[in-house]
Every structure is written in structure tokens, then in C-alpha cells.
Amino acid sequence: MSPTRNLIIIGSGPAGLTAGIYAARSNLAPLIIAGKNPGGQLMGTSFVENWPGEKSILGPTLMTNMHEHAKQLGCEFLSQEITKVDFTKKPFTLWTHKNQELSAHAIIIATGAMPNKTGCPGEQEYWGKGVTTCAVCDGAFYKDKKVAIIGGGDTAMEDASFMTKFTNEITIVQILDKLTATYAMQERVINDSRINIFYNSTLTSIQGDGQHVTGMTIMHKNTQHVSNLPVDGIFIAIGLKPATTIFQDQLQLTDYGYVHVKNHTRTSVEGIFAAGDVSDARYRQAITSAGIGCMAALDAERYLKDSGII
Amino acid sequence: MSPTRNLIIIGSGPAGLTAGIYAARSNLAPLIIAGKNPGGQLMGTSFVENWPGEKSILGPTLMTNMHEHAKQLGCEFLSQEITKVDFTKKPFTLWTHKNQELSAHAIIIATGAMPNKTGCPGEQEYWGKGVTTCAVCDGAFYKDKKVAIIGGGDTAMEDASFMTKFTNEITIVQILDKLTATYAMQERVINDSRINIFYNSTLTSIQGDGQHVTGMTIMHKNTQHVSNLPVDGIFIAIGLKPATTIFQDQLQLTDYGYVHVKNHTRTSVEGIFAAGDVSDARYRQAITSAGIGCMAALDAERYLKDSGII
């Protein structure tokens, strides 16, 4: 087992890397566990237009810049995934999927969240073959084709609006009797003749020719009426699942499985902090994750100082 | 009086501009009041090395980029200062120093904070003539000269460390019996032979030759012992005063005069939000201000939607 570190950061999206940048500048010599998806959700996006100061930047470029910044300041990176933790004793212990044991006086959880799936028949079979969660990444493959967006929130509206650049045949399948997205996003979609919305409807199966999606079945919840629709691409936009499975018996989580935080970044265990989508079901922006990542690093430094560890 | 706007943002630092970027993308057509110090505190800095993704960027460049970004997305700017507000009636009313009356359904306060002054004799007379609050801006003028830093917190430590690039004769004057900065910053300063620290001491006057600072008088609080020290530059680093004077009888403030917020950005008046240094005495970073500015815009949009205004 390696010596106990001051600070380990689990996750390398905007929250984890910003925490790393601040912790490194405070001479905490942080170790960042890059995890299963280094760089986080932005690695699967195309152009980002709401990172302050950058009119338009590729998501992967933004994350590469942050990674390089953290590295230059002395952050160490470990390309493994954490599969088990023990937060009941100090210093805290972590184990990687390669069974490497790590120890730290303070931990920042920045493991993010992953898109939910519907679980309907055909979804898994055609995942990456017409079924995806990222319209911005894959939209251009569907020029003049039929596409469906599953969901009625902000992401679904963004996906639908984005797809109008490529095609006039867009269907939204929403389980409720109304959309839940913010007003401006809803309005843009509702007033667009290229977009057709099925309310009170669920996706019940996805069909294909073995190579690619060719159709889908949806059912009206009230009438039980079933429709088979030809479709070339299906974008699943029904929310996120926070990556908290390994913390379930270690930390207080919210009803939706997010890490419960108070006072910005503090979890139910002193010395364990959380930042980014793993503890934020509300804002979920790169800039908010980065801001809270910075707070977590400053809070961790203060904790280490108050505990006499540094 | 101009028509009532959805959203007015008071202030144009990282919090105000990020709020503007998000609000503009939500089609809220925000008006940003640029204020007395457009761009905020970063306009008075040199290189910023902790903005995630930018290894080193000039503070004014970062703020110009954000301003251009906000402008391109359709934010309107007004180069005036708000001198009076009425938050007791909806829609809210604001008046500028040119007596222009403005009206808005929602407001984001991002007026920031300004450095405190000591108020000692000579401080005002030699302000900008050897007395300053920005070591990073003015440090290079003091190559091989004698400088003093007033204060014992993070800013004072940063200033002292920064000045070691230019001179070996640095004095810190701290009113308490210990420093209050974070550990790593303290350690760097305490272990540096170029820096001498006077504890329990206050700056009682500043002397000069009419053109520039030449010396200072400090007093030991316990012994009342007075020392006259030759000095060429004095950097005042004793904290910030939030710009909340015009909100005093309109909003709940904290004991230190910051806007009191709950749930990230909500003030004591529904429809009025706050972001950045004006409501944050703890983190005060550009990236945290930007993150909270984004939250304020999303919260304001949600409020406008829930109120049936948009």
C-alpha cells in the first residue's frame, strides 16, 4: 500500500480537474483518479457555447485544456477506476478495479453522472447502432432521416432543436402530459413545425435490421394505443444517474441517489467532499461543476489545516 | 421610463457576465449594468493562473473575452451605475446615477466587493503614489525597493510571495498574533528570509515627500511601542467590502454587509438573486463567481417561468 496522501480526487470532469488545479496550487499534491470516463460528459459533446469567455469550443478541447493545466501544476493522474471505499476509518481507504489500495486524509468525490436508459427491448442491442444519448455528437449522421427524442426536459428540447439543423422529421416521445423543460426551450420546440410531440407516451420497443435501428413502438399510457413508427435514430434524453453506487453504504445520499451535501461541498462524513453532477441534480453545467470543484478544494484544504494534517 | 425587462443584471465581473451569457441563451434578453468598475476586480490584475483550462491568461483579457461572449449572445450593456433601488414593489425599479429609471421582473445582483482601506493618515494622500491594493499590478515598480504588506490573510500572503520576485526587503504588518491565511500560503511566507513579519501591529500613518511614499509608522498593540520604517511601497491587503450600500434597506444582509443568500442565489426578496463576491465572503474566486452567476441566471429563469412572466 502506498503512503497516505493529503487529498485524492475521484473523477476528472470539470469538477475534478478544477479541484485538482486549486489543490495543486495549494501544495496538496493531489492524486486524480481519472475513472472510467476521463474528462467526463463533455468528452462526448461537440461544440460548447456556454463556457464563459469561449464563444464556441469543442467539449473535448476544453477538457484537454483543463487536464493539461492540472498536469502542469503537478496533479498526478491514475488511469484506474475506484470500485470500493472505506470511509468509516481515518485515513480513508480506496481500492481500484485492479485491486490497488490507496489511502488519503481527505477525498473529493467528483464521479459525475451517467445518462439513464429506458430498458426497453432492443435498446441494448442497438446501442451505438442508432440508439444514443448524444444528439450533438451523432446528429450529423441523420441528415434527412427520421429521428426520435425520448424525454421532455431540457436535454430533450436541446436535442430536438439541434436536430432541426439536419432533418425535418423529428418526433418527441414524452411520458407526461406536458414538457418539463425551461420555458424558452419548450417554446422553441412547440413552435417548430418540424417537430412532432407525442404526450403521455412511452417507448416500448426498438426494432432494427440487425445492423441499425429501423423503427420503434410507442404506447399511449391512457388509451393503451400502440403505434409502430419507422425511425432511423433514437436519442434517449431521460435524465441522469449519479455515479454513487460505491458510496451507498458509506455516505448519506438523496432520494434520487445523489451525494447529499450541505454548506456547498460537505458530505455526511467529515473529510469527504463532493462536487459536480454527483451532488447536483439542478444546475449540471460545466461552469457550475468547475465552480463547486474549486470550492471543494478550498474546503478540503481548510479541513486538512484545521485537522493539523498540513 | 423604458418598458419593464425580464431581467436586469447589476455588475459585469465574472458573476454578472456569466449570468448574462446564460440568460441570453435562455432568450431573457438581459440588460447588464456595467457599473463603476466594468469587468470587476480582475481588470486590476495581471496574470491569472487558476482559471480552469488557461495555464496563464491576463485578467483583463479573460474579462474582455467574457464581455465579447455575452455581447455576441445578445446581452445589452448600460455604462452607468445604479444608485437607488426599490425592491418593495413588483416589478422592481432601479435608478442610475444619471437618474435614468429602469424596471425589471427579476434582478441579479453581482456588484462584487472592493478592497478595504486602513483609514490611517497619509493613506488617501499617497493613494496611487506608493499606496495600492494590487501587488500583482504594481509590484514591478518596486524592484530592489522596500515594500510593506498590510494584512495576514490569503491576499497578503499572495502579495508577499509575489513581491519576492522583485525585492528582498518585504515587511508584513499583521494586526493579530498570527497569520490567518491558508496553511500553504503561510508556510511559504514564514520560511522566506526575504519577508519579515510584525505581529500584533497596526499601521498608524504613512509618510511621503509629497510625490511618493517614503515611510510608515507602525505601533505594537500590546507594548504601544512605535516604529518608523523607511518604505517605498505599501500594499493594503485587509479584506474586501461588498458593494451593498444601496441594498441596505431593501435586502437582508449578513453581519459583514454581504447579501444574505439561501439555496445558492436566493435573497430575502423573491425575484432578486445574488451571485459572486457580493454574497460570498468565503471563496471569492473568478471560477466560483462564474459558477454562481450561472446558477443565478437559471434560478431567475425558473422564477420568471413559475411566475408566469415568460
Image (cartoon, coloured by chain):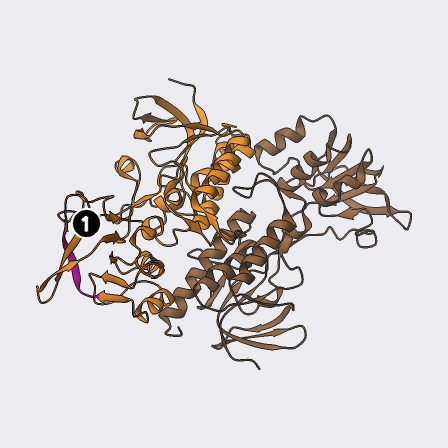
Chain colours: A brown, B orange
Image mark 1: chain: B
Which amino acid lies under the numbered mark 1 shown in the image of this protein?
Val
Q: Is residue A257 at all visible to an observer of this figure?
A: no
Given the current orientation, which residue lies at the most extreme top position?
Answer: B1
Instruction: Tell whether position B205 is magenta.
Output: yes
User: Magenta region's main secondary structure?
Assistant: strand
Q: Position of residue A105 (x, y in %)?
A: 47, 73
Q: Residue at x 44, y 55 (%)?
A: A264
Image quarter where the C terminus of chain A lies is bottom left
Q: Position of residue B206 (x, y in %)?
A: 15, 51
Q: Which residues are magenta?
A: B198-206
Q: Nearer the viewer, residue A84 or A206?
A: A84
Q: Which residue is mark 1?
A: B213
Q: Nearer the viewer, residue B274 or B76?
A: B76
* Left or right of residue B231: residue A266: right
Q: Nearer the viewer, residue A166 or A235?
A: A166
Image quarter where the N terminus of chain A lies is bottom right
Q: Residue at x 46, y 54 (%)?
A: B49
